Image: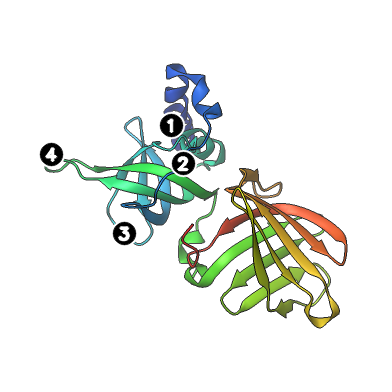
Amino acid sequence: MRAARSLLFVALLPLFAGCQLLEAPRQSVSHAGQTRMQGELTAADGKLVFQPCQEQRRYIVNDAGGTSVLQQAATLADDSGKVFADLRGRIVSSASAGTESQLDVEQLYRLEPSATACDNADFKRVILRAAGHSPEWALTASGKGLVLDRAGQPPLAVPYVEEQLGDGRFNLGTEANGQKVELWVTPARCVDSATGSVQHMSAELRVNGQVQRGCAYFGGARDD
């Protein structure tokens, strides 16, 4: 619990400087010079630290994009104080020897309390992953097509077409195998009702007119 409380303390620090940070509108920025990375967030010496998967390097986190990563990580921290993070940012090297470099976080794709997310071998092949509950469903899109898994039904693997709708919205659709499947995606912070994980897009699944809602995120095969 001490580690989790430490992460909560780190998250509260910027709130004293100005609560308007949470309400700041997102700005359109270039990805030039930025890197997408996955790893673990922890609190250390009053700072939030990011360590990429399978690496020893660590970076001091600076929320340059107004993502609220500090507050959201504190909410999800377990007793170990660790949270899995999928993010995009710019590495700023330290001028002092022995001092950890800084990671200016610009985009937050996903945060979740998982100890195994770094071991997901399929992540780099996935274009988009969406899921919801009541009843359970999950949709994975890749270069080979999409696979829809639903509770009590066999997996549905079909080709699909993507349509861009503007403002970052898009949908994936198919009418293969006598089924009309549509996934409507909107760039908006979404919290998974079962796991508490935070994802950067909301999703609406429509199968033959039946609607279910959930959250979504881009996989490693999509550079958005």
Badge 3, how many Cα within 10 Å: few under 14, some, many 20+? few
- Dot 2 falls on a residue whose secondary structure is loop
Badge 4, how many Cα within 10 Å: few under 14, some, many 20+? few
Q: Name the residue under label 3.
A: 55
Mark 4–mark 3 Cα distance, whole angstroms, equals: 21 Å
Q: Which residue is drawn at 64% across and 45% down?
A: 190
Q: Residue at x 42, y 44 (%)?
A: 29
Task: Tell whether 96 sits left or right of 181.
Answer: left
**CB-based contact (under 8 Å), mark 1 and mark 2:** yes
209, 123: nearer the viewer: 209
- Dot 1 falls on a residue whose secondary structure is helix
Task: Tell whether 151 sits left or right of 113.
Answer: right
Residue 116 visible to the viewer: no
Task: Tell whether 217 sits left or right of 148.
Answer: left
Please identify, in this view, whether the residue under mark 4 or under mark 3 is nearer the observer.
4
Q: Which amino acid does label 2 sit on?
A: Gly
The tag earlier along the polypeptide, 1 or 2, is 1
Q: Mark 2 points at which residue?
A: 81
Q: Which amino acid does label 1 sit on?
A: Ser
Mark 2–mark 3 Cα distance, whole angstroms, equals: 18 Å
Mark 1–mark 2 Cα distance, whole angstroms, equals: 8 Å
Q: Mark 1 points at which residue?
A: 6
Residue 99 x, y percent position in the rendering? 18, 40
Mark 1–mark 4 Cα distance, whole angstroms, equals: 26 Å
**CB-based contact (under 8 Å), mark 4 and mark 3:** no
Residue 33 x, y percent position in the rendering? 31, 52
Q: Name the residue under label 4.
A: 96
